Image (cartoon, grey):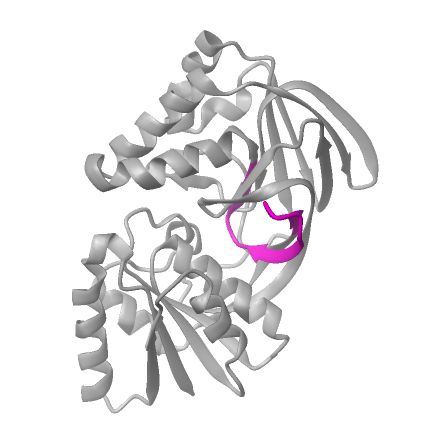
Amino acid sequence: MKYRLVMNPSSRSGRGVRLWEAWRDRLARALIPYESFVTEKQGDACRLARECEGESVVVAVGGDGTINEVLDGILQSGNPGLQMGVLYAGTSPDFCRFQRIPVDCEEALDTLLKGNITEVDVCRIRYTDEKGNNITAHFGCSSNIGMGAAVARSANQMRRSLGDTLGTGAALLKTIFSSRPADLDMIIDGEPVSLAKVNNLSVIKNPYLASGLKLDLSVRPDDGNLWVMGLYGKSRSGFLRLLPGWYTGSVVRYPGIYLRKMRTIKVTAAPRQEIEFDGDPRGRLPAEIELLPKALRLRGASYERA
């Protein structure tokens, strides 16, 4: 089996480079065949995964952004011989936590090379970018409409100086006081649904969100289900009262929460709302999201299937 390592040198503010060197040294000593690439700009990791041929493991060496690009590239390639691996070098390992992929340097590589392969669910999303182009992409964690894009944008900046947990918390507080709710029209598994004054709508495959935030949902990587959660009608003070529930997971049981399992959703709004997935702002509504059951062959995940 050939390994293609795709490394983001800016992950963990550049500290991931040291891990990268350690992993390459171990692969060389073990005589494991591999090729390595260093990304230079956004989109490189997706392209390198998409262009990979034959039976290969494409390994994302970086944080959640690199993981998302590699996942997207594998799904876009249409190559059934591709597997995905992760050597985590980021700061907020939501994907790894859900898939039970080790983040310790030594253990991560050992687990990757053992060859345990699981088929896990991913999501396909269609949306419009800022230039008006229709985009099709994939994600493995969650997507947010409304506040989520603004939180992600601010958090990506604030984490550099405040760290992961404080940076995300500060970004959330900033967004609470600057955002405005919107009325959303949806079609969920073929059923029309409208929600008024929505603060944020989340489409969730992974209940771990960022920096300790989580949702107390019954969800597994291969269970064939998505969740949609809408927070609506919340004042700023009302939203602040929800904050403890984001850290315990109990926010899903608070009043004023729309929650249901699903497989497909279409969302529109006027004015068009921003959309985020897997930690980065992407574009705007309208959006369509569908579950692709067991569409990704993931190497190194250690959860036990039901």
Q: x%, y% of residue 131?
A: 61, 48
Residue depicted at x 54% and y 21%: 253
Residue depicted at x 47% and y 63%: 43
Q: x%, y% of residue 5?
A: 35, 75
Looking at the picture, tell me which residue is in the foreground, 171 or 294: 171
Q: Quadrant of residue 272?
A: top right
Looking at the picture, tell me which residue is in the foreground, 32 or 273: 273
272 is within the stretch colored magenta:
no
Q: Look at the picture and state if 195 lies above or below 14.
A: above
Q: x%, y% of residue 184?
A: 70, 26
Q: Look at the picture and state if 165 lies above or below 69.
A: above
Q: Look at the picture and state if 166 lies above or below 119.
A: above
Please indicate, yes or no, whether residue 57 appears anywhere in the rendered image.
yes
Please indicate, yes or no, whether residue 303 appears anywhere in the rendered image.
no
137 is within the stretch colored magenta:
yes
Residue depicted at x 34% and y 41%: 156
Residues drawn in magenta: 126-144
Considering the image in quadrants, where does the C terminus appear? Answer: bottom right
Q: Quadrant of residue 242?
A: top left
Taking 202 as reference, is 287 left or right? Answer: right
